[in-house]
Image (cartoon, helix red, strand yellow):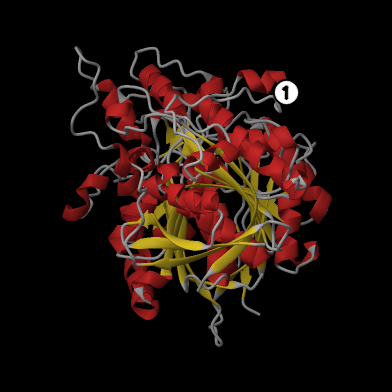
Amino acid sequence: MKPLLLREYTATSCIGRGAAATLAALLEQRSGLKRCDFDTVRIDTHIGEVPGVDAQRLPKDLQIFDCRNNRLAELALQQDGFFDAVQAAAARWGRRRVGVFIGTSTSGIMQTELAYRARDAATGALPASFEYGTTHNSFSVADYLRQRCRFEGPAVAASSACASSAKVFGSARRMIEAGLIDAALVGGTDSLCLTTLYGFHSLQLTSPAPCRPFDAARDGISIGEAAAFALLERVPESLDGNAVLFHGVGESSDAHHMSAPHPEGLGAKRAMQAALDAASMQPGDIDYINLHGTATPSNDRSESQAVTSIFGPTVPCSSTKGATGHTLGAAGALEAVISALAIRHQLMPGGVHTKRVDPTLTAHYIRENRRGAVRRVLSNSFGFGGTNCSLILGCAG
Amino acid sequence: MSLSAYIGGLGVLGPGLHNWPQTAAVLSGRQLYVPAPTVLPVPAMLPPAERRRTGRVVKLALALAREATANAGADLLQMPSVFSSSGSDGHICHEICQALATPAREVSPTRFSNSVHNVAAGYWSIATGSLAAANVLCAFDASFVAGLLEALTQVTVDGETVLLVAYDTEYPPPLYAKRPVPDALGVAMVLTPERTPNATRIELTLTDEPHDKMADAQMEALRLAIPAARSLPLLHLLAIGAPGRVILEYLDVSRAAVRIEPCV
């Protein structure tokens, strides 16, 4: 594929609002996970909550979109001058020539959860104030961003569970290459809700402790929330030295199970190889791998096998989910932004909370930060339904 | 800028619409439309253990995908897919939200696994054994055109033969009052980059022009009731089998102009 420029990027998660705060947390190896005290949830687990989401307000004319997920999207949009940057893109290319591609797994489902607590005792009806389409529906967050930024190009939500916001890079890439648009707002937004907390708990996939990816004693995920965005454009003729490019994307399916990864990481392997092929790169071109690394026993085992089978046992890799939690449909975009920061600031972030790396996992998992040239990063995102996506980001040249 | 492909297979299922040939007969006026609740077949292509767990979304999407790909006779193992739906399984959503509104909050693990928007794509991959990519999209009432755009870019840019499945299922009360989708309906297409015998050429551009409606009152009611039925003006044109152009509803400020040229 033809590389694209990440002209702007931003991320907001429990480790910080915006790129600078995110980078600072990575440099300090600080985790944002805390004991779960979300809403009325009574589960012995840890969560990655973004402070201040409830206090965030949406513009008056877009109140119909009001829900936790869109508040988080708005909060993230205001960081790093990102909102102004995308407005400038609309001015540069025309409103019809900017597309919106946003990944989410549960969007604003919490509005429906709350509405079900407030059903009419006699009729069972949901409250009159409850809006389904502009809050709960998966498209809500993409539509909110489209209307907020006043874009008039194609817009879509991608909802492939935890691979959602990695896959939007692929869809945006195709639409730019087809010539339908000149710029794309890509990213992901997923917010804490009861469906995912109780749902993953019912599958016995949540850990009582802060999650420990690749640890010998890892015992499940910590659910987090995040919004992360990038503005993609074609690569201009001249680039500054700090530019980060999107070089390749690989997508695959497992054909195995709805909620368990393929034991040997068959689909994961295929996605990573396809990303290398798309980028016209060899495994040796990758300096660091940002793993999906959820900290479930089965995910980390199959991902380690898949990584080692392609890259061997020496490429440094880590999961940043010990810091951010698993932000589900936002994880792909959040970790793409972390990968961009890794390249820009020459940092391989060590995985936090992991005490003893599982000796049976062959991938080269790093627990301490490493500084030095990081020219190319591969970032993995896998999800329920056996969906896999790998992205390759890198510096220019 | 336009996107184009050849239609190598079609599948349709909906209220009173049992498959593509029968739907084509209805839409071209050769057969009377008899409204009836959508009948969803058991997905025989899934292993029994998986089959038991599937809800209406999966049954609908798999039936559509199967009809479209059976006609195309294509190699399923290599075929990327695009699944586009205006929502996930409304029944599962209802069950989960109802459970979460009780003090016990016992969510069924199977229901939770099947609540993801990409549930049909997951089961399609399991059913076919295909490791090819699936892109799973939602654009609320614009989901059919959003899926068509994604599929056509895959054909045009990557030269892939792509399966598009656009589908919606009904919502139970009390959600129905907020999202009145009355029944299940969907359409599937195999879109190929190369012309095959008897394949119809499809070309899409975005436009400001007002969208087309169905002349038949029952079909127009259906078009408005179920998001995937926003495809009906296109299906009508395909049923007639003549060259032509229709404007499909997409986003508020944007519509899709679709031109059809049957190959003879």
Q: Chain of mark 1?
A: B
Q: Seen in the image, is B72 located left or right of residue A192? A: right
Can residue B75 be seen here? yes
Q: From what the image shows, is residue B129 above or below residue A230?
A: above
Q: How many marks?
A: 1
What residue is at 39 percent from the left and 33 percent from the top?
A193
Q: Quadrant of residue B252?
A: bottom left
Q: Position of residue A324 (x, y in %)?
A: 49, 45
User: Quarter of the image containing the C terminus of chain B?
Assistant: bottom right
Counting from the top left corner in percent of width and height, residue A52 is at 29, 46
Q: Measuring 80% from the left and 55% from the top, which residue is drawn there?
A: A311
Tell me residue A342's x, y (percent).
58, 63
Q: Label 1: how many residues lie within 10 Å, few (<14), some (14-19) or many (20+)?
A: few
Q: Position of residue B25 (x, y in %)?
A: 53, 40
Q: For the residue marked with disc 1, what is the amino acid? A: Pro
Q: Is residue B99 above or below residue A304?
A: above
Residue picked out by circle 1:
B47
Residue B143 shows in the view = no
Q: Nearer the viewer, residue B195 or A70?
A: B195
Asked if residue B246 lies left or right of residue A241, the reply is: left
Residue at image coords 67%, 57%: B199
Task: Please state which of residues B96 and B135 is positioned toward the viewer in this rendering.
Answer: B135
Q: Secondary structure at mark 1?
A: loop
Front residue (pair A181, B189):
B189
Q: Is residue B200 above or below residue A239?
A: above
Q: Is residue B250 above or below residue B88?
A: below
Task: Name the residue furthest bottom.
Answer: A238
